[in-house]
Amino acid sequence: MNQYVINGGSPLVGEVEIGGAKNAALGILAASIMTDETVTIENVPDVRDTNVLIQAMESVGANVIRVDRHTVKINGSQIHNLVIEDEHIKKIRASYYLIGALLGKYKKAEVPLPGGCNLGTRAIDQHLKGFRLLGANVKVAHGAVVAEAKSLHGAHIFMDKVSVGATINVMLAAVMAEGKTTIENAAKEPHVVDLANFLNSMGANIKGAGTDVIRISGVPKLHKTEYAIIPDQIEAGTFMMAAAITKGDVTVKNVIPKHLECISAKLIEIGCEIEESDDAVRLVAKDRLMDTQVKTLPYPGFPTDMQPQMTVTLGVSEGISIVTESIFDNRFKYVDELTKMGADVKVEGNTAIISGIEKYSGSAIAAPDLRAGAALVLAGLVAEGTTTIEDIHYIERGYEDFHIKLANLGAEIAKVETEKDLRKFAFKVV
Ligand code: EPZ
C-alpha cells in the first residue's frame, strides 16, 4: 500500500535538479524505432510512463539497452510485430504514439484504444483524421485502432482542435510519407518542438515546429542519432509552486526559463520573487500569497498540467481566485480531496472559484491522477498536522524521486509501505 506521509509546515529551501521532459520523451522514444540504426537518447526521465512505453517497444521486438538510469540505446531493426498488446496501452495513453511511428515506418499498426488519466473524454479523432488524410485505412475494431496503408502521401491537415498528441502522432506518420505535409492549428508545446528536433537529427525534414503551422517533407529513410531530451517544464513548475506555497526559497536547476514564462508570470502576480539565469530559476516567497485569475491554454498559455498545483496554491492565498480549465472537460475531480483538507473551492462547470483559507489541515486523501496527485502533495506540505496520500502510483508516472527531491529541500515527507512505517513517521516528534 505505498503511500506518501507528510508532516506539514516546513518551508522548502535549496536547489533541485529537474529531469528530462516526460511528454517529450514519450514521443521521442516512439520515434526512435523509425530507423534500423541505433539511437542514443539521454536525459530520459526514469518514471513509469517512459518505462512502460519502453516495455511496449520491447514487446514488438525493439532492442533497448539501458546505458544508465537516464540514457537508453534503442534499435528498432528487429521489430517483427506491429500489434501492441493491451496490457501496455492500458497502463499509459501515450503508447498510442506507436501507431504513428509504426504506421510511418512499416505502413501498418494495431494499437488498443488508449487509457491514461481520467481527465474527461480523451478523444483521438484528430489523430485518426490525420492518418486517413495521409492515405491510411484506419478502423477502430475490438477496442483497437488498426491502421494500414499501401503507401503514405503528403497532405494538408487542419486540426479541428489544438492537440499535443494528435500533432505528435501525425508528425510521426508523415515524416516518411511521400511528398509534403502541412499541419495547421498544430500544438506548439516545447515537447512538440523537441520531437521535431529529434526527428530532424535523424534526417527528417520538419519546419515550423513551435508555430501553429508545421511543414514536413517526407524522406525515405531515417538514420541513427544521439539526442538529449529537454528539461521537464511541468516538473519545474511543480517545484516552483511548492516553493511558493511553502513560502520557501528554491532554485530549480537544468531548466529552460523560456518554457516557464507563463508559470513565472503568474507566480510573480501572486507575490513571489523570481530570478532567472541561463538554465535555472530561483523563486522566493516571503509573505502570504495573493489572489489571481488563471485560464489554462495551449502553449505558450498557462499549462493545464499546472492547473491543479495553481488551484492548491491559491487555496491558501489571500482573497478569491478564479481558475478556468479550457483544455479538459473534467480536471477538477481532485477538489473533493482538497475539500477534506479544509479548502473552500466551488467548481461550476470548467471553472473553480477559490476562497483562500489560512491553512489546510492534514487528512487521509488519495491521488486521482498524475498532476492532481502532485498538487495534493503540495497541500500536504503546508497542512497543519499529517497528510497521507494513497494511489501515489499516479504521481510516480510522471515525477522521478518526487518525495526524495522534496525531502532534500526540507519537506517532512516519506514513502511508506506499511501502516507501521506510516505511524512511525507521522507521529515522530516534529
Ligand atoms: C498531452 O495529452 C499530455 N500528455 C497531457 O499531459 C497534457 O495535459 C495535454 O497534452 C495538454 O497539454 C502527453 O503528452 C503524454 P491533447 P493529450 O490531445 O495529447 C481533445 C500529463 O500530466 N482532443 O492536447 O492527450 C482532448 O480531449 C498529461 O503529463 C480531441 O478532442 O492532450 C482534450 O480536451 C495529462 N481529439 C484537448 O483536445 C483528439 O483527437 C487537448 O488534448 C485529441 C485531443
Image (spheres, grey):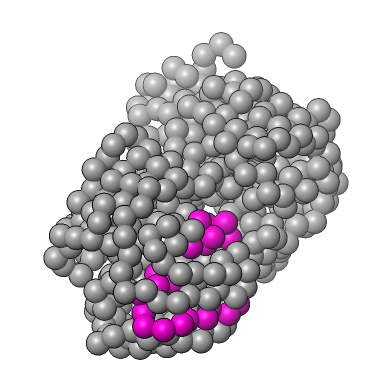
Q: Is residue 174 magenta?
A: yes
The percent coordinates of residue 105 (x first, y second) are 28, 72
Q: Which residues are magenta?
A: 169-196
From the image, which quarter does the C terminus lie in?
A: top right
Residue 75 in sight: yes
Residue at the image point whose x is 30% and y is 69% from the top:
221
The percent coordinates of residue 78 (x first, y second) are 15, 60
Say left or right for 315 vs 169: right
Residue at the image point whose x is 67% and y is 44% from the top:
257
From the image, which quarter does the N terminus lie in?
A: top left
Residue at the image point whose x is 62% and y is 33% from the top:
252
Say left or right for 135 vs 356: left
Q: Is residue 231 magenta?
A: no
Residue at the image point whose x is 52% and y is 66% from the top:
164
Q: Quadrant of residue 363?
A: top right
Say left or right for 284 vs 234: right
The percent coordinates of residue 284 (x first, y second) are 76, 30
Residue 359 in sight: no
Marker count (numbered): 0
- Of 129 and 105, nearer the camera is 105
Q: Is residue 166 above or below residue 125?
A: above
The percent coordinates of residue 329 (x first, y second) are 58, 69
- Of 146 and 412, nearer the camera is 146
- Of 81 and 385, nearer the camera is 81
Q: Quadrant of residue 98?
A: bottom left
